[in-house]
Image (tube, helix red, strand yellow):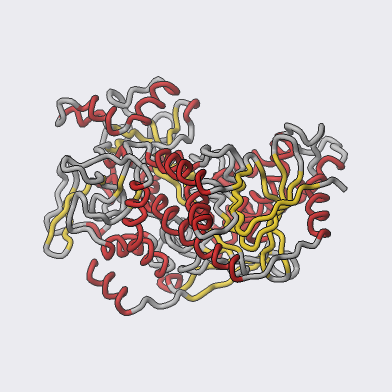
C-alpha cells in the first residue's frame, strides 16, 4: 500500500476562498493550529470572480436601509424557505464584517463624503452592495489573504481531499493527495470546516471555475451529514453566450445596476412585459429608468432588469423559446444606451466596470461602451448544501462545519445578488470561531489506519483497471454535463428528470470501471476520474430533490407544475445517505418564525 504523510491540526479548513480564509483567520485568532487545504493555488479561489459587491445594510447611500429591510429582502428572495436564524444573523452582522474588511485594508469605492459607496442590485430594496468597481471578490481575497498569512496558517496548495475521516461519530480529519506529484496526505484534526464552494461543473454552461465539482457536498454526504435544498440551483441570467471564447463567462449584475438594459432581437425592452404583481404600485409607469413601487409611505424607483435572478433568467428563456432571442440563443444586454443621458458614458462605464470592459475587449473584441453583449442564463450558484446549525455552522456530524456556498440555509429557494460575499464573511467567521471552540473542548482524535488504506485503494483503483475500450473520465464528465444542462436545467419536468436519473445510474457504473493510464504525477485524467464521484452524487441529489418538489418556487421552475403550492412552503427537502448506501430524501418542517421576526416581514410587506 502507498505511503502517506500525517499532519496534525486543531482545525482543518478545506477551501481557501472567502469563507475558508475568514474561517481560518478566526480560528487562528483563537489560538487554534490551523491547516488550510486548497484545490488550486492560494489566491486563485473562485471568490475572485465575484464582481458586483458585498450586500450589507450600511445605509451609506439611502438612510432608509437597515438590517430589518435586508432580512425581509433575503427571506422574500428565498421564498421563506430560508433558515431564518441565518438570515437574521447575516443581516445584523454583515455591516460589521464589511467595516472589518475595510480596517484590514480593503479599498472600497467611496461616496463624495468619503463613506463606502453602495449600488443597486437585484432583489434588494435599496442600494446595498459595497463594491470595488467590478472587482469586489478579488479585493476581498487579496485582503483576507494578506491578513491571514500573518496568522501562522499552514497552507497546502493544489491538494484534493477524497475522504473525510471519523473517530466514532465525530470527524477526525481528511485524506487526500497533492495534485502535482500524487502523493497522499492524511490531515488529522479535531474539527473540519468545509468551504469548498459549489457544483457548477456538473452543468455544461457555467460561470464556475474548474474546481467546482461539488467536493464538499459529496464529502459531507459520504461522512453522514445531511444536505438540504439541493433542488435550488441558481442560473445567473447574464452569462456570455457568444463569442465562444467567453461562453459561460459571467456578466456581473453590476452592469444592470449601473444602467444596462435587456433587449430582444426586435430591440424591445422585454422585462417590462412581466413585472410581478407584488412589485407593481399605484404609480407604475414605463419610464426609461424603470417603474415605481411603494414601501410604506415612500416611493422607490427600480429598473425591471433588477428583479430577482430566477425571474430575469426565466424571462430570457421565454424570449428565446418564443423566437425573439439573439442569433446565438440569448438576448442583448446593452449598457452603451446610457450615452443618451450621460455625456461621458464611455468613461463612466470604464470607471465603474473596469474588469468587464477589459476582459470582453481582450477576450472577445467587444467594446461594451459602444455595443451590446449577447447573454443568457449560465449555471452560477448553489443554494443547497450541507445542513448546518444557524449559529455555529456545525453540520449533523459532530466537529464538521460548513460555510459559504457549500452550506445551505441562508438563501432558501433563491439567493439575492451580493448576499454571497457577505455570507462568506459572516458565516466564515462563525464557522472558524465555533470550530476552534469545538477543538479546544474536545480530546485528541484517533484515526483508524484501515480508513486511510481504504481511501488509498479507492483512489488508485483507476490505474489498476484494464481500459477495454471503455469510456474515459472526460467522456463521462462531458455526457453528464450535457444531460444535466438539458434535462435538469432552468426549466424542468418529471419525464426529463426521470431520464436524467437513469443516465446518472448508468454513468455511475461506467465511472466505477473507468481506467486511466500513466502514473500519479501530473495526471489530469486521474484527477477527473476521482472528481466524477462527487459530480454524480450532487447531480443525483439535485435531480431527486427537484422531482420531490412538485411546484415552481425560487430557482426551481417546473413546467409540469408551474405554480407555487402552499403545501411545499412548509418544509425543506433533506438528502442523506441511507444505511444501505442509497440516497434517501426526507421532508423536514420549517421552524416557525419568532414573533418579532414575523412582525418585521409583515411590516416590510
Residue at 42% x, 21% y is 362
Placement of 397 over or under 164, stated as above or below: below
Looking at the rendering, in which quadrant would you find the C terminus?
Answer: bottom left
Residue at 50% x, 41% y is 46
Placement of 587 over or under 218, stated as above or below: below
The x and y percentages for residue 230 are 54, 59
> Number of labelled discs?
0
Horizontal relation, residue 356 to residue 543: left or right: left
State whether residue 231 appears in this view: no
Looking at the picture, tell me which residue is in the foreground, 479 or 472. Answer: 472
Horizontal relation, residue 470 to residue 491: left or right: right
State whether residue 302 appears in this view: yes
Residue at 66% x, 59% y is 189
Looking at the picture, tell me which residue is in the foreground, 403 or 598. Answer: 403
Horizontal relation, residue 556 to residue 132: left or right: right
The x and y percentages for residue 272 are 24, 46
Q: Quadrant of residue 119?
A: top left
The x and y percentages for residue 602 are 26, 72
The x and y percentages for residue 502 are 68, 54
Horizontal relation, residue 563 to residue 118: left or right: right
Residue at 21% x, 27% y is 345
Amino acid at each position: 500500500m502507498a505511503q502517506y504523510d500525517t499532519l496534525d491540526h486543531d482545525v482543518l479548513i478545506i477551501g481557501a476562498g472567502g469563507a475558508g480564509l475568514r474561517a481560518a483567520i478566526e480560528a487562528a485568532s483563537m489560538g487554534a493550529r490551523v491547516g488550510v487545504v486548497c484545490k488550486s493555488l492560494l489566491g486563485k479561489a473562485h471568490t475572485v470572480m465575484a464582481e458586483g459587491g458585498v450586500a450589507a445594510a450600511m445605509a451609506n447611500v439611502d438612510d432608509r436601509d437597515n438590517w430589518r429591510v435586508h432580512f425581509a429582502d433575503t427571506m422574500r428572495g428565498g421564498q421563506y424557505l430560508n433558515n431564518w436564524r441565518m438570515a437574521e444573523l447575516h443581516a445584523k452582522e454583515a455591516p460589521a464584517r464589511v467595516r472589518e474588511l475595510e480596517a484590514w485594508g480593503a479599498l472600497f469605492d467611496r461616496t463624495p463624503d468619503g463613506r463606502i459607496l453602495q449600488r443597486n442590485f437585484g432583489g434588494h430594496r435599496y442600494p446595498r452592495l459595497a463594491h470595488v468597481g467590478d472587482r469586489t471578490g478579488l479585493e476581498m481575497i487579496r485582503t483576507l489573504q494578506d491578513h491571514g498569512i500573518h496568522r501562522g496558517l499552514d497552507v497546502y496548495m493544489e491538494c484534493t481531499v477524497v475522504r473525510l475521516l471519523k473517530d466514532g461519530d465525530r470527524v477526525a480529519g481528511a485524506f487526500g493527495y497533492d495534485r502535482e506529484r500524487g502523493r497522499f496526505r492524511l490531515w488529522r484534526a479535531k474539527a473540519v470546516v468545509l468551504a469548498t464552494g459549489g457544483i457548477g461543473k456538473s452543468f455544461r454552461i457555467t460561470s464556475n471555475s474548474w474546481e467546482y465539482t461539488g467536493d464538499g457536498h459529496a464529502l459531507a454526504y459520504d461522512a453522514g451529514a445531511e444536505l438540504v435544498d439541493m433542488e435550488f440551483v441558481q442560473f445567473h441570467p447574464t452569462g456570455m453566450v457568444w463569442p465562444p471564447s467567453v461562453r459561460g463567462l459571467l456578466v456581473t449584475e453590476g452592469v444592470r445596476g449601473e444602467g444596462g438594459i435587456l433587449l430582444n432581437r426586435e430591440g424591445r425592452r422585454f422585462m417590462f412585459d412581466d413585472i410581478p404583481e407584488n412589485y407593481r404600485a399605484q404609480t407604475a409607469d414605463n419610464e426609461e429608468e424603470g417603474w415605481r413601487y411603494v414601501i410604506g409611505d415612500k416611493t422607490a424607483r427600480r429598473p425591471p432588469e433588477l428583479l430577482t435572478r430566477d425571474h430575469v433568467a426565466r424571462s430570457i428563456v421565454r424570449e428565446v423559446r418564443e423566437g425573439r432571442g439573439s442569433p446565438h440563443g440569448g438576448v442583448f444586454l446593452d449598457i452603451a444606451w446610457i450615452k443618451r443621458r450621460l455625456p461621458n458614458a464611455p468613461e463612466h462605464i470604464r470607471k465603474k466596470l473596469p474588469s468587464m470592459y477589459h476582459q470582453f475587449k481582450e477576450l472577445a473584441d467587444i467594446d461594451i461602451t459602444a455595443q451590446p453583449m449577447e447573454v443568457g442564463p449560465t449555471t452560477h450558484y448553489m443554494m443547497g448544501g450541507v445542513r448546518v446549525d444557524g449559529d455555529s455552522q456545525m453540520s449533523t456530524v459532530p466537529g464538521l462545519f460548513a460555510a459559504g456556498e457549500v452550506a445551505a440555509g441562508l438563501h432558501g429557494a433563491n439567493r439575492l445578488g451580493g448576499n454571497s460575499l457577505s455570507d462568506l464573511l459572516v458565516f466564515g467567521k462563525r464557522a472558524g470561531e465555533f470550530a476552534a471552540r469545538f477543538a479546544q473542548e474536545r480530546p485528541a482524535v484517533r484515526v483508524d489506519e484501515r480508513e486511510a488504506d481504504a481511501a488509498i485503494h479507492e483512489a488508485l483503483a483507476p490505474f489498476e483497471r484494464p481500459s477495454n475500450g471503455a469510456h474515459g473520465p472526460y467522456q463521462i464528465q462531458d455526457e453528464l454535463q450535457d444531460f444535466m444542462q438539458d434535462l435538469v436545467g432552468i426549466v424542468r419536468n418529471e419525464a426529463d428528470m426521470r431520464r436524467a436519473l437513469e443516465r446518472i445510474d448508468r454513468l455511475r457504473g461506467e465511472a466505477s470501471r473507468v481506467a486511466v493510464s500513466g502514473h500519479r504525477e501530473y495526471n489530469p485524467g486521474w484527477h477527473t476520474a476521482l472528481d466524477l464521484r462527487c459530480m454524480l452524487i450532487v447531480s443525483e441529489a439535485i435531480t431527486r430533490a427537484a422531482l420531490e418538489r412538485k411546484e415552481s418556487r425560487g430557482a426551481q421552475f417546473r413546467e409540469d407544475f408551474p405554480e407555487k403550492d402552499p403545501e411545499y412552503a412548509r418544509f425543506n427537502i433533506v438528502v442523506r445517505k441511507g444505511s444501505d448506501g442509497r440516497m434517501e430524501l426526507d421532508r423536514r418542517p420549517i421552524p416557525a418564525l419568532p414573533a418579532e421576526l414575523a412582525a418585521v416581514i409583515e411590516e416590510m410587506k
